[in-house]
Image (cartoon, helix red, strand yellow):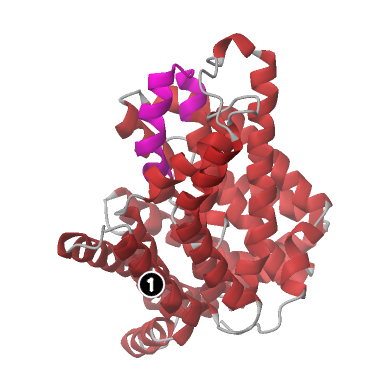
């Protein structure tokens, strides 16, 4: 049967299921079922059972709930308060002063959370009241939080990098290492924007009525030691080859319990809430991955991915042109789907194109995460926008408007890693142990 007709039927089915409010994972399974029922002679039940079980039982996937749990534990501690206290004395001399705390606070929390929404909420609940009290412009407070929160998807341990690694069968440990330098560069670009804006609008930055001395600055570093130590321990164990990503995730959970205990935040209520939060998030992602695996199998039987790859090849696009086309595609797709769904939904079609073009899968993983990050601050389905709307009481259009400069900075970041791919590939190339 003509594969164009098949593709139209499956796209209509997908849109109908998603538009009907069906969970993303179940929608993917439904489309896969339709594809196999209409376009393949293979028994559906057997194929689905084997495929879903295989996709859900891999050892590598164990890292996912552990890293989610680690972030959930720390989300319920005084971490955001400690981040603000530890960073603010050091940021005051910079143009923009405490606005930089939004970016660095998000970067540090991203390194132990892996979630964009959790990063935005955790840093925002402490930073917004403090900066409002001091008279900082609201558009910059909200905008920098929206941009800084996206670092939760890029700086390891990133949940979406784990999802990509499982879907694309790429080493998660190498993906984690690949995300470190781009995360630092992107945070630096955000801070650079704050500096430029502050120099152009010096009258909108409140005067610093406190001039912390060196003693106060170094005392403030003590507030950061637990989180910095945990980050160094988790990522260092991966990079030095002491542990795989999964083993490091287990160490991270133990370390987060230790941090919570030291801060006297380890209560039964917090433990229960963190565990249930991790279960809910992990189950949601696992269902999406299972549905994606079944859809990938079904699409393979229809031959649609290969046909699309051949079609793209017939256009004689260069790798650069293909990357630009995919970036635009994912930015548009991200306006309607969350990042994880956008990645797993398209892997079956995109991976043959990437492989055929000879694009490095580790580099593409980081690239696609940055592209998906931009969708976190683009309406109508920008999760960071929703989080900030709830925290500030502002309209979604206002939040999206003040976050637009951060979107532009992220586009600059995409151009940068395309022109200088070593930003992504340098650290993974030096890994001792690449197991997931």
Query: Is residue 139 found inside the magenta-colored segment of the image?
Result: yes
Q: Quadrant of residue 22?
A: bottom left
The x, y position of residue 305, in whole percent, is: 60, 69
Q: Secondary structure at mark 1?
A: helix
Residue that label 1 marks: 253
The x, y position of residue 306, in whole percent, is: 64, 72
Q: Is residue 27 visible?
A: no
Query: Is residue 53 found inside the magenta-colored segment of the image?
Result: no
Q: Nearer the viewer, residue 106 or 7?
A: 106
- Extreme-top residue of the structure: 203
- Extreme-left residue of the structure: 269
Q: Residue at x 38, y 20 (%)?
A: 133
Q: Residue at x 37, y 37 (%)?
A: 126
Q: Quadrant of residue 316?
A: bottom right
Q: Is residue 138 visible?
A: yes
The x, y position of residue 250, in whole percent, is: 42, 78
Q: Which residues are magenta?
A: 120-142
Quarter containing the C terminus:
bottom right
Q: Residue at x 72, y 39 (%)?
A: 412
Q: Alpha-carbon neighbours of circle 1 within 10 Å: few (<14), some, or many (≥20)?
A: many
The x, y position of residue 52, in whole percent, is: 37, 82
- Extreme-front residue of the structure: 215
Q: Main secondary structure of the magenta part?
A: helix
Q: Nearer the viewer, residue 369 or 63?
A: 63
Q: Quadrant of residue 428?
A: bottom right
């Amino acid at each position: 049967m003509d594969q164009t007709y098949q593709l139209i039927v499956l796209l209509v089915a997908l849109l109908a299921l998603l538009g009907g409010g069906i969970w993303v994972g179940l929608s993917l399974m439904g489309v896969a079922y339709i594809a196999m029922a209409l376009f393949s002679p293979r028994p559906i039940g057997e194929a689905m059972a084997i495929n879903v079980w295989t996709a859900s039982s891999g050892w590598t996937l164990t890292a996912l709930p552990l890293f989610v749990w680690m972030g959930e534990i720390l989300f319920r501690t005084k971490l955001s308060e400690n981040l603000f206290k530890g960073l603010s004395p050091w940021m005051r001399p910079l143009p923009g002063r405490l606005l930089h705390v939004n970016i660095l606070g998000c970067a540090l929390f991203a390194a132990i959370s892996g979630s964009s929404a959790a990063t935005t909420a955790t840093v925002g609940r402490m930073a917004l009241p403090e900066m409002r009290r001091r008279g900082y412009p609201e558009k910059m407070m909200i905008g920098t939080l929206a941009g800084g929160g996206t670092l939760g998807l890029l700086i390891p341990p990133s949940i979406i990098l784990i999802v990509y690694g499982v879907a694309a069968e790429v080493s998660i440990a190498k993906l984690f290492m690949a995300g470190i330098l781009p995360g630092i560069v992107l945070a630096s670009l955000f801070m650079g924007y704050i500096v430029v804006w502050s120099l152009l609008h010096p009258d909108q930055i409140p005067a610093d009525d406190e001039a912390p001395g060196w003693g106060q600055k170094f005392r403030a570093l003590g507030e950061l030691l637990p989180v910095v130590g945990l980050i160094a321990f988790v990522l260092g164990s991966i990079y030095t080859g002491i542990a795989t990503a999964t083993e490091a995730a287990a160490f991270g959970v133990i370390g987060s319990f230790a941090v919570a205990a030291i801060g006297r935040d380890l209560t039964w209520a917090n433990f229960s809430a963190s565990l249930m939060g991790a279960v809910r998030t992990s189950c949601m992602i696992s269902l999406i991955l299972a549905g994606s695996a079944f859809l990938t199998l079904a699409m393979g039987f229809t031959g649609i991915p290969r046909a699309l790859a051949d079609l793209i090849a017939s256009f004689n696009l260069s790798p650069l042109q293909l990357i630009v086309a995919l970036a635009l595609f994912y930015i548009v797709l991200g306006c309607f789907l969350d990042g994880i769904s956008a990645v797993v939904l398209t892997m079956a079609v995109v991976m043959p194109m990437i492989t055929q073009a000879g694009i490095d899968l580790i580099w593409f993983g980081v690239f696609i995460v940055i592209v998906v990050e931009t969708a976190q601050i683009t309406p109508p389905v920008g999760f960071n926008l929703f989080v900030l709307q709830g925290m500030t009481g502002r309209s979604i259009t206002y939040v999206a408007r003040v976050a637009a400069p951060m979107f532009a900075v992220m586009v600059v970041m995409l151009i940068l890693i395309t022109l200088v791919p070593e930003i992504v590939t340098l650290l993974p190339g030096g890994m001792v142990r690449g197991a997931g």
